[in-house]
């Protein structure tokens, strides 16, 4: 998997959102290279930090993370 360059302005093109299908398992959180995911039910992605890499979506066991 190729990750994007991190010199892009953060938060400009947030492409991922966590839906209500989230089961709060925590699988996505350690995958985020910029720590944009916070715990909750459902978990949340901080649009100011997200760099649109998709690492979180690729590991979600219930497909609760998708492009917004």
Image: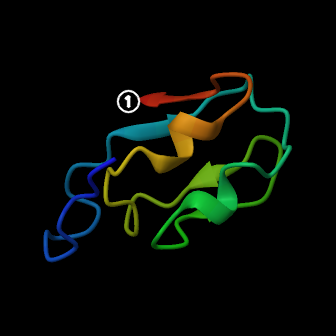
Identify whether 49 is placed above or below 13.
below
Q: Position of residue 26 (x, y in %)?
A: 80, 52
Q: Would you place residue 18 above or below residue 31 in this image?
A: above
Residue 39 is situated, as x and y percent measured from the top left of the image, at: 77, 59
In the image, 54 versus 14, the foreground residue is 54
In the displayed structure, 44 sits above or below 68; it is below
Count every numbered label the image shows and give the total: 1
Please provide percent x and percent y for residue 5: 17, 67
Task: Determine whether, in the image, residue 21 is placed left or right of residue 56.
Answer: right
Give the quarter of the figure containing the C terminus. Answer: top left
Residue at image point 53% right, 36% down: 58
Instruction: Give the farthest residue toward the front.
Output: 1
Provide the residue designation for mark 1: 68
Percent coordinates x, y for residue 20 in the rendering? 72, 26
User: Does 66 sit left or right of 19 as displayed?
Assistant: left
- Answer above or below: position of 35 versus 31: below
């Amino acid at each position: 998997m190729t990750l994007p360059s991190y010199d892009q302005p953060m938060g400009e093109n947030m492409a991922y959102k966590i839906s209500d299908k989230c089961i709060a398992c925590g699988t996505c959180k350690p995958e985020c290279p910029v720590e944009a995911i916070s715990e909750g039910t459902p978990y949340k992605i901080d649009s100011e930090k997200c760099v649109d890499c998709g690492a979180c979506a690729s590991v979600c066991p219930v497909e609760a993370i998708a492009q917004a």
